[in-house]
Amino acid sequence: MGPLAGLKVIELMGLGPAPFCSMLLADMGAEVILVERKAGDAKPVEVTRRNRRSIALNLKQQQGIDTLLALVDKADVLIEGFRPGVTERLGIGPEVCLERNPGLIYGRMTGWGQEGPMASAAGHDINYISLTGALHAIGRKGDAPVPPLNLVGDYGGGSMYLAFGILSALYERQQSGKGQVIDAAMVDGAASLMTLFHDLREMGSFTAERGAHFLNTGAPHYEVYETKTDATVDKQYISVGPLEPQFYDLLIDTLGLNREDFYPQADESQWPRRKEILAAVFLTRSRQEWCDLLEGSDACFSPVLSMWEAPEHHHMKARGTFIDIEGVQQPAPAPRFSRSQPAVPVPPRRPGEDSVQVLQDYGFDAEAIEQLLASGAVMQ
């Protein structure tokens, strides 16, 4: 089930962005075979490993390499997230795989890219978004930049762009019949995500000063405010974002504020004072009281919920945005489809749990499977 049903993907076990890309494809119905380095008795709990079958191969043995290549022969996509040159040294690089399977889409996920002076250097999300201008722009006026978890580089700029590249290459293959290599670099993706702000810079409305633009906490009407709590409850917050004049009018009127203090909306010289007024107002009621007054209106209001609270919100519940799989609460597959809606995900498999079944499905006979297991090239 799902729009990618029938798509065969081989994923070389890695960390972070590459597995998340594979999860996105698997959630949409692709058959993803996760190639593990060793078998294991314990079932993993990582949500991003859901919806795969697992085969354990010893890639230090030639028979292990040969087995992987035999799987690649019948695959549509291979995904790897190693440093540049690693798969080439193993004998499973793009040149070898595409020679055997000319229609293969070979997806490569790195931070710096396959080439360039920093291509082989270690790094993490914070480093990649530092180099693109994204991290510099995030934070409050007068304060240091604030890393936005690892969402912008690893997942927004990495996983999503690799998935987009793979699907684009699959579409192109329908015309050309040829596979190709996807070089998905987190620096490239994070830079691409900043396109809007390059537009704003050219228009003169976005400067190097943090916290000065309406989208990065400069404006009182696009901000987070603390609400009233007592000593028994952690601090709670709400967010408002009525950028459009009619929505801004609604917020000001609903709060009963003096209009002379809040107009014209775009008067940046008054933004700091207006923030002080709104901060004092929002401290007068609890988060729930503000929800009762504003949530669901066009005032562009939301409570700021924790990961623990979010699944219990009535809108999230109504949409089934979060699901429970064997006692593990997690986000449901997204987006949604009118005809080919994906099935409910299956939990992660034990490393090597599907080794024999995968080999059978890919055409290995019983004798070959026994020999591979005996040699240690395949583990279960």
Image: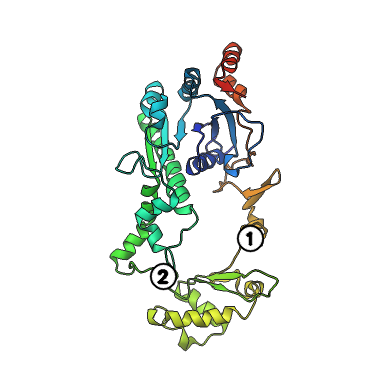
Specify the farthest residue to the front: 122
Asked whether the beta carbons under mark 2 and mark 1 sit within 8 Å of each other, the answer is no
Q: How many marks?
A: 2
The residue singled out by tag 2 in the image is: 211
| Tag 2: amino acid | Gly
Placement of 136 over or under 172, stated as above or below: below
Q: CA distance from mark 2 to mark 1?
A: 31 Å
Q: Nearer the viewer, residue 262 or 271?
A: 271
Q: Which mark is residue 78?
A: none
Name the side, left or right, on which 36 lies relative to 273: right
Foreground disc of the pair 2, 1: 2
Residue 52's quadrant in the figure?
A: top right
Instruction: Report whether residue 55 is seen.
Output: yes
| Tag 1: amino acid | His
Residue 71's spot in the image, x, y percent? Answer: 50, 23
Residue 218's quadrant in the figure?
A: bottom left
Residue 259's spot in the image, x, y percent? Answer: 48, 86
Name the side, left or right, on which 109 lies relative to 3: left
* Quadrant including the N terminus: top right
Residue 330's spot in the image, x, y percent? Answer: 63, 49
Instruction: Report whether residue 92 is seen.
Output: no
Query: Secondary structure under badge 1?
Result: helix
Placement of 292 over or under 168, stated as above or below: below
The residue singled out by tag 1 in the image is: 315
Looking at the image, is mark 2 or mark 1 earlier in the sequence? 2
Placement of 42 over or under 299, stated as above or below: above
Specify the farthest residue to the top: 367
Q: Report the residue at 47% width, 18% height from top.
A: 62
10 Å neighbourhood of mark 1: few (<14), some, or many (≥20)? few
* Quadrant including the C terminus: top right
Q: Report the residue at 36% width, 44% height from top.
A: 112
Query: Secondary structure under badge 2?
Result: loop
